[in-house]
Each structure stands twice: as C-alpha cells, then as structure tokens.
Image (tube, rainbow, N blue to C red):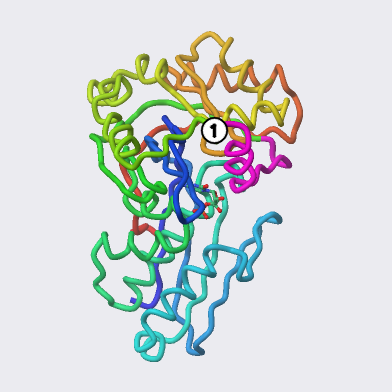
Amino acid sequence: MRSYSLIAPAKINLYLEIIGDRPDGYHELVMILQSIDLADQIEIHSISDETIRVHCEHPQVPTDKSNLVYRAAELMAKKFPAALAKYGGVDITVDKHIPVAAGLAGGSTNAAAVLVGMDLLWNLGLTQSELEELGATLGSDIPFCIAGGTVIATGRGEQLSPLPSLDHIYIVLAKYRSLEVSTAWAYKTYRQQFGSSYLQDTNDLAARAAAVHSSAMVKAILEQDAAEISQKLHNDLERVVLTAYPQVLQLRELFAHQEGVLGTMMSGSGPSVFAICASQPQAEQVKLRIREAIPDEDLELFVTRTTGKGIQVNVDG
Ligand code: C5P
C-alpha cells in the first residue's frame, strides 16, 4: 500500500514517582501509564522525491524539525536508506485533537504513529520491540505510545511491563489552551527543590522500581476497581507545577470537590488535569459543572475513556 491512516491515542499518568537521577541527565521514574481514546489521526503516504513533508493545521504545532513527527521520519530515513531509495520520501498530515504541551504525550504518540506507519509503508517487518527501541531514542514516552494500554514504565519511562488493560473507565480532561508547561522545566525544577531526597544507590533504585508491582495501585488495577485506583493516583510533578501555575491548582481543586469524581490528578508534567468518574453520564455532568464554574473559552474540556490500544491502523481511513 502507498498510504496509511493511523490512530494515535493520548495517555494519562495514573502514577508518576521520581526516584532518582540518571547518568544520562534524565530521571529514574516509576510510572503507570494509561492510554485514553482521545486521539490524533495521522495520514502518511509515499512521495517520489526523497524528502519529508509534514502538514498540520493546528497553530501550536510546528511542521519543521522541531516536530517529533519530522524527527521520527528522519530517523527511519537514516536507518533504512535502501527503503528510502526504493519507496521514496513521506508526506505526513497530523489531524490534531490531543491538546498540545499538555502532559498527554501528544507529540510522542504522533511520532509513534509515524514509526509504525513507515514500517508498514516500507515493508520493513520490524517487531514491536524494535519499533519501541527506535522510539526510545527520540523520546521517553514513545515506546509506551506504540504499545498502549495499561503499563508500568520504569527507567527513563521506556522500560515497559504491561498490566491487564483497564477499559471503559470514564475520564474528564481539562487543559487551558494557552497554558503550556515544558517537561524539561518541570523535571529540572523538581530536581532543584527535591533532588536531595533522591535515592543514590543502584540497588535501592532497583528495589523501589520493583516495589510498584506489589503496590496498592497495581492491586486496584488488577481488580479493575476504579474507586480504589482513583484513591491511589499520584504524581510527584504536581509539587512543582501546581505551585507555579495557580490556574492548574484551581482546576485540580475544583475537580476534587465535584460530586461524581472518584479521584483527580495532573497528567505527566501537566498542565492537563483529569478526573476519574464512575460512569459516562457522571463524567458529562462533571464536565458541564466545570464549564459553568469556569466559563473561560481558553479552557478545553473533554470526556474520554481508557483504552487498551496503542497505535492502530485505521481501516476506515
Ligand atoms: O524524553 P523526552 O524528550 O520526552 O523528555 C523531555 C524532557 O523531560 C527531557 O529533556 C528531560 O529534561 C525530562 N525527563 C527527565 N527524565 C525522564 C524523562 C524526561 O528528566 N525520565
């Protein structure tokens, strides 16, 4: 086939704990990542000249090398020059629905879709773990975005251990359109403020990472207990982002006091905040009440739900 259409879902962090520094300058993390059905659509087709073209109508999304989509295509072209010569370059269109710079892995999931799409387009036959390895060189969240579902992620976030998928948990998601938080800033500020408490010893780091498997959150996930999962939500980065961004703190508190909300947390490095609800009608009610409380058009609100899938080929596309 000369073209593919792919669905690229966003993620939320049910759990994010920063446990130490890494020699590569990143952080050792323990996370539980969850795909949601809020997704972008990526169209990718072969072009005769050996170039990469990226299109996106969203005003906040660049189409040059600063976009991970471009860098993913460039990586594939570099790794597989024979395929580039045989099949030509690629033209990629991103239909953006996931809020940008939101802590929802929007850029990472787009790049993941490009890796999956170019593997198909160029008949490379790469395995999922080969694709994940390539993805990890571009961004820590990309391996998860390829795999999707409900996953424990450790190391830089690229070491994945799948959990049974948590389907049909309803979520209200909120993000101020004009508010962007730099992930690098959030981690750097956290290190400045709390770095003195990081674990230093390699054995201690390994033990802490392993402990997540027997944690209350994993037990709640295994039991598909939405109320218990909601009680165990955790994100260390809230400690820096909620302090620096009062609007996000306000949103977080507003969610916490809504009837029908089982639990609420910021996702990733923010500034998006999500709330878990017991049912779709309750999620719709919560969304309405948040809209009434904050009639600001800059605030984007979505009702979405958990999904067990990562990047998918859109057969209707
Ligand atoms: O890997 P990715 O490019 O998505 O990470 C963005 C930034 O977040 C990194 O440049 C780094 O500053 C920070 N980060 C970190 N530790 C991680 C993942 C990300 O410090 N495990």
170 or 203, which lies in front? Answer: 203
Residue at image position (53%, 28%) is 274
Q: Please tell me whether residue 123 is drawn above or below residue 312 in the rendered image.
A: below
Classify residue 93 by image quadrant. bottom right
**Which of 104/153 is in front?**
153
Residue 182 falls left or right of residue 5: right
Above or below — where is 146 with respect to 175?
below
Quadrant of the rendered image containing residue 200: top left
Q: Secondary structure at mark 1?
A: helix
Left or right, 309 with respect to 10, comes to left
Query: Bounds of the magenta span?
Result: 176-194
For the point 35% across and 85% down, which residue is it?
Answer: 83
Q: Nearer the viewer, residue 115 or 243?
A: 243
> Exactly how many numbered labels are in the figure?
1
Q: Residues within 10 Å of mark 1 (few under 14, many from 20)?
A: few
**Residue 198, percent from left and from top:** 47, 34
Magenta segment's dominant SS is helix
